[in-house]
Image: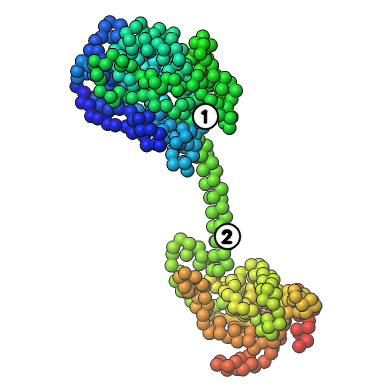
Amino acid sequence: MMSVQSLQQQAESRLKLKDLLRSRQLATTDLGTVIAEPYTLKEGLFFDNSDVALLHQMKQLVHDNINQFVGICFDKQTEFYAIWNHCFRGTLADLMALNTNPNGNLRVSENDSGLAFEENFKCAFVRDIIRGLEFLHASTVGFHGSLTPSQCLIDSRWILKLSGFGLSKLLYKWCIKGSIDLHYYSPEMRCLLKTISKGSAMFSIKQAQAADIYAFGIILYEIIFRRKSVILDDNHHGTEPIDEEDETLSIFCETAEALIPLCPSIPENIEVHPDLLGLMQKCWSGIVDQRPDATLARKITDATLKISGSLVDEMIKNLEQYTNNLEKLVKERTSQLEHAQEQAEHLLMELLPKSVASELKVGRQVEPKNYKSATVMYSDIVGFTSLCSESLPMEVVTLLSGVFKKFDMIISQHHCYKVETIGDAYMVTSGVPIISRHNHVRDIASVAIMMRDFLAEYEIPHRPGQKLHCRWGFNTGPVFAGVVGLNAPRYCVFGETVTVAAKMENSGLPDKIQISLKSYQLLMARYPEFKCSPRGGVRIEGIGTLLTYWLDGREDLLTSGRSVASNQR
């Protein structure tokens, strides 16, 4: 059993509504959804042996570009339904209607209020039509008979399938009320249809095949040039009631025939392969024998359009290419991300000690910690404030950048950590956060001497010949260190040792390194190669009088002119 439910398919366009309406119905069967095309007959429904044989042959046809014929059903003697497999994406006529402008030209871009009728679609549809037609001509049915864009159905995989084939032999015989697109029929077939409608003999297979080639040429024109071959009100789609007393019934609108040109005009602004254009014109030839057969037409279209596989295959190929490009892009972006991550990690290592940064990266909390023995050093540029007032901002930035860059390089050669820079002030520690029992005082002493020797040769960039002078001071003792802040974490060192180190620098002299008693004692006990001289008691505000020393240099560096000059002060 089959239940039929009405569905009117409409394609919105500015063309006349009659040209776009196609009476179709969907039917639900145990095999799925099918299309039921209604046909009203002038005479009663009757099947002879040849009719049954033709229907059987139609049902046996199986091909990728042929729509499956399911069968027929009827409710009354003057009306029946031809049942075809339903294709999800509609017909080629629907697609062209959605892409047609008021002047009959097909839209070529989505910005023109339609769907883009792109080159790969165009080539794939032409190829599918001619392959389906070639199969039909070689089959037991032998012809299509009513090839129009409305009979070119498109399935969910964008494969075009020819539908409606073979039935024209029955429908013309039974003289249905007009429902054909006249301009897709060859001139000789239009003449023959007039006699058929009056009960004369039917057309031959050869005539039908030649007419199919003519229809293919018209459809090829509309697809390639993206325009209708003729805008003509030449069909009624079976919508008018049948008057059984009317002797002038015809299967098409004969008054429109005079308006159909012998062949469509070729647009000059569109380039087409010469072989494809020649094929198109041969298909329209008024001499039937000059029209190519379906096999030759297929060979020419394959050679000129050069498309392999189905449209979905082409889409998959494009998708694979896109995927490969995407993989390459992902690889490039990953490399850029890794590079940016390395830079971020490098910056993090500059802002925080490596051990602390590693803990924070994995989400671990860094607890504050006491260190029993560490050395803290401060340095400060003498006369920096007055220098800034007499220099341009960029000159000051260039000066500090050059000095601190060298200072950072010196620190990197020793087990020291730069805690912070505030303006021209520079704070360095050793023994924090990596515990060092005694080496921290040696490392800080070496750093201070190398900084001093560097400045002995350094000239202020924007003041050639003028030297830069600094004070250094460091102290040894217990400190307390930890990470302060969440959004911008900083590693900070606290304690009396830090305060005394700052006072050592503040109370020092230009080009001199002042050290506390604790630093002096540890340095002399463990590293006698460092040479120091006593300064004496220095009163420190808030602390009292402290015994301090000058760090003169190291035995292998005492030949430095700056060290000798410092010793003479």
In front: 502, or 181?
181
- Residue 107: x and y in percent read 47, 36
Q: Secondary structure at mark 1?
A: loop
Between disc 2 and disc 1, the foreground one is: 1
Q: Is residue 50 above or below residue 355?
A: above
- In the rendered image, which residue does mark 1 sit on? 225
Residue at x 54%, y 46% (from the top left corner): 329
**Residue located at (52% from left, 75% from top):** 492
Earlier sequence position, callout 2 versus callout 1: 1
110 sits to left or right of 237: right
Nearer to us in this view, 507 or 294: 294
Q: Residue drawn at (24%, 25%), measured in percent from left and top?
A: 29
Q: Is 317 situated left or right of 411 in this image?
A: left
Q: Amino acid at mark 1?
A: Phe
Callout 2–callout 1 Cβ contact below 8 Å: no
Which residue in the structure is indicated by mark 2?
Answer: 343
